[in-house]
Amino acid sequence: MADFKQLVFSGVQPTGNLHLGNYLGAIVKFVELQKSHDCIYCVVDLHAITVPQDPRQLTSSIREVTAAFIACGIDPKAHIIFNQSQVPEHAELAWVFNCVARLGWLNRMTQFKEKAGKDRENASVGLYAYPALMAADILVYRATHVPVGEDQKQHLELSRDIAQKFNNDFSEWIARTGFGDAFFPLPEPLIQGPATRVMSLRDGTKKMSKSDPSDYSRINLTDDADAIAKKVRKAKTDPEPLPSEEVGLKPRPEADNLVGIYAALSGSSKSAVLRDFGGAQFSTFKSALVDLSVTRLGPIGAEMKKLTGDPVYIDSVLADGSERAGQIARKTMDAVKDILGFIRH
């Protein structure tokens, strides 16, 4: 198999109201990975329009996600931050992958079924074909690793299937153009950390979501210290003290969620948190969680507000990132055209 340069790619949709779940489930991992890998982080605005968007709100949300990347510690000079729509090769490669992917593969994608609901005939073609674009996002950079949550693992498997089929279908032409026995890598998932799934503060069985009508269900990255403290104190709990061992969290989703959040914010494990707080009442634990949350998240919110107040700077980061990303993507797309037999001028 060909030897590929290690490269991390991931993207975040600009759908507004980034919250603690986005931070602990994705962005904190992005920050960590830049210490060990070359990284490309994308604001996936083409994915956002698979469902209706208000154009003014979309502009604001693209800048907000960019600000969150920088405020959380991603270095836009050492790595690449850009918005997907500014690198046309994403859409171009997605069309090629639409012709490589099989209908049966897309029919198995559970996320489309969940998002389209019962009214599937009324869903956009984009929502259905979105996994082929996701594969193009990764493979246009020939990225080798993708930090993903459990809910995206199926899409990454599809990316691997598409890459494998392209490599097999065009193996003779790949070899003729000097790329050995494989043009695309089979990207590997990176799943790390104790709180990859952060649940609602109002219902420990539901994922934390910006679409929940109650703002008390989530901690937004732009919340100030007072808002963070109020939401943690009002978070749903049960009447029992915290258990001393992790097994005691299983039948208690709200307790499990709050302990998981504390573990992730403190860089420890649930069992370590329970060693410190096992047997304590929730009031004691919540006070400690308030202090920790405000210490970790307060500066991020303040920096995000400062950055979003300077759209010229944000846009310059995106322009620079798009230029650098585009240089890589163009090389890939030129090679794909040669492999497919297209004539380039």
Image (spheres, helix red, strand yellow):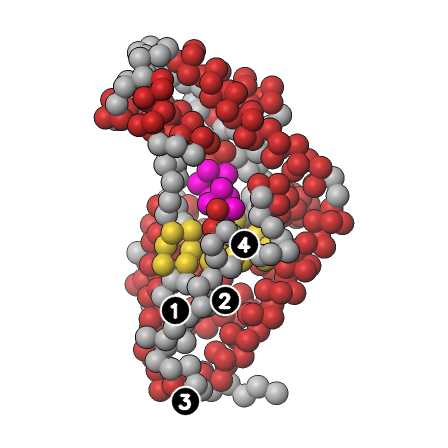
Q: Quadrant of residue 275?
A: top left
Which stretch is magenta? 23-31
Residue bearing mark 4: 41
Query: In the rendering, which numbered label is found on residue 149?
Result: none
Q: Where is residue 297 in the image (x, y as percent from the top left)?
A: 56, 31
- Residue 218 vertical placement versus 339 (above, below): above
Query: Is 148 included in the stretch rendered in magenta?
Result: no
Residue bearing mark 1: 185
Q: Position of residue 326 (x, y in %)?
A: 60, 67
**Rendered residue at 34%/27% (across/down):** 272
Q: Distance between the residues labelled 3 and 4?
A: 32 Å
Front residue of 120/66: it is 66
Q: Earlier in the sequence, mark 2 or mark 4?
A: 4
Q: Do the residues labelled 4 and 1 touch (CB within 8 Å)?
A: no
Residue bearing mark 3: 176
Q: Which of marks 3 and 4 is nearer the N terminus?
A: 4
Q: Distance between the residues labelled 3 and 2?
A: 21 Å
Q: Distance between the residues labelled 3 and 1?
A: 18 Å
Q: Can residue 219 be seen in this view?
A: yes
Q: Is residue 125 visible?
A: no
Q: What is the three-letter code of the residue carrying label 1? A: Pro
Q: Earlier in the sequence, mark 3 or mark 2?
A: 2
Q: Is residue 225 left or right of residue 180?
A: right
Q: What is the three-letter code of the residue carrying label 3? A: Arg
Q: In which quarter of the image is the C terminus?
A: bottom right
Query: In the rendering, which numbered label is found on residue 141?
Result: 2
- Residue 112 vertical placement versus 240 (above, below): below
Characterize the local packing of mark 3: few (<14), some (14-19) or many (20 or more) Cα atoms within 10 angstroms.
few
Characterize the local packing of mark 1: few (<14), some (14-19) or many (20 or more) Cα atoms within 10 angstroms.
many
Q: What is the three-letter code of the residue carrying label 4? A: Tyr
